[in-house]
Image: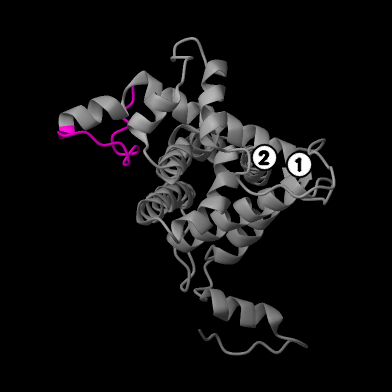
Amino acid sequence: MDEDLSSVVRNVHRSTPEATSRLANHPLTRAYLEAGVRLLDREFDASLDGTDRFVRPLGTLTRDTVIAEVANGPAELPQQGTVGSFRDRWSYFPDYVADLARYTLREYHSAPANVLARTAAGTLLDKEFAAAVHEIGYESTVIARDSTALRFRFLAVALAAQDEHIRETMTRLYHDITDTWQQLCSDVFAARGLRLRDGISFTDLATILTALNEGLALRDAHSPGSGIVDDERRRSLVGLAALALFAGAADTGDGRSVAGNAEHIAGKNGSRPADRD
């Protein structure tokens, strides 16, 4: 809990940069942000309890609930919040929400999903490839499905339209996610002596896989039993999609582009159209 929050808490101000940094990194500031995260956790969990009710997004997040929630925080953080100390940091509640958005979104960098991405290359090289892809796809889907940061990210899309700082945060976040999985794909192809077909890049692969994982995880979270995740077999549609992408994107030595290979496979009655983009 000793990380610098100055780049995240942008709506707390003092007369000098040094004083602003001290306040941004004050334990009580972090306590208020952690309180907001816990409230979001509970709100998202409640939205999945199967009851027939409409809950306004962020409806449980108010200045009073955040201040009260500080008392439920970990022992290493202050557990006494007041209206005065809150307003000393955020004069307007939307400023707090914007800082909370950045704080929550940044959790990706220390989240299990990032750890999984960093260790996946070794798994894909040391084990049977298809089984390893299925296992990573399953773990990635489960992590995303249970992630407050991911669910908040979808809400943040709307917030980003009104807040330039949140837009910047989301842009950096997705840039980092893409870089991480792009490097993984590149490393696996290189280690196995493979190359991509023309017409697709490792950035394309990473972007597609990220979108599939987030979209399927969100659907599974709101529609359990939809067949997206099989906990008993530790399988998910993300793993299946990743294998299909790999099979279509890897150049098997025929030199065809992605589009050209699709045309070749789609040919009927033994007729194979000329390879073309």
* Horizontal and vertical percent position of residue 257: 51, 76
Residue at 35% in and 38% down = 8
Q: Position of residue 78 (x, y in %)?
A: 44, 14
Q: Quadrant of the N terminus?
A: top left
Return the x and y of residue 140 as percentages of the image width and height: 61, 41
Residue drawn at the location 44% of the way across and 52% of the way down: 174
The structure residue drawn at horizontal position 45% and vertical position 61%, both measured from the top left corner, is 161
> 98 or 108, which lies in front?
98
Disc 2: which residue: 44
User: Which element is circle 1 on?
Assistant: loop
Cα–Cα span, label 1 and label 2: 7 Å
The amino acid type found where label 2 is placed reads Phe
Up/down of 275 relative to 177, above or below: below
Q: Which corner quadrant of the image does residue 20 belong to?
A: top left
On the rendered structure, is 23 left or right of 230? left
**Around disc 2, counting alpha carbons within 10 Å, would you say few (fewer than 14), some (14 to 19), or many (20 or more)?**
some
Does residue 1 appear anywhere in the picture?
A: no
x, y (%) of residue 5? 33, 31
Part of the protein shown in magenta: 2-17
How packed mark 1 is, by other alpha carbons closer than 10 Å (few <14, some 14-19, many 20 or more), is few
| Callout 1 touching callout 2 (CB < 8 Å) | yes
Q: Amino acid at mark 1?
A: Leu
Task: Indicate yes or no whether the magenta region holds residue 75.
Answer: no
State the mark number for residue 123. none
Q: Residue at x 47, y 73 (%)?
A: 199
Q: Nearer the viewer, residue 107 or 70?
A: 70
- 141 and 126: which is toward the camera: 141
Query: Can you identify the residue that label 1 sits on?
Result: 48
Main SS category, magenta section: loop
In the depicted structure, whether residue 33 falls above or below residue 261:
above
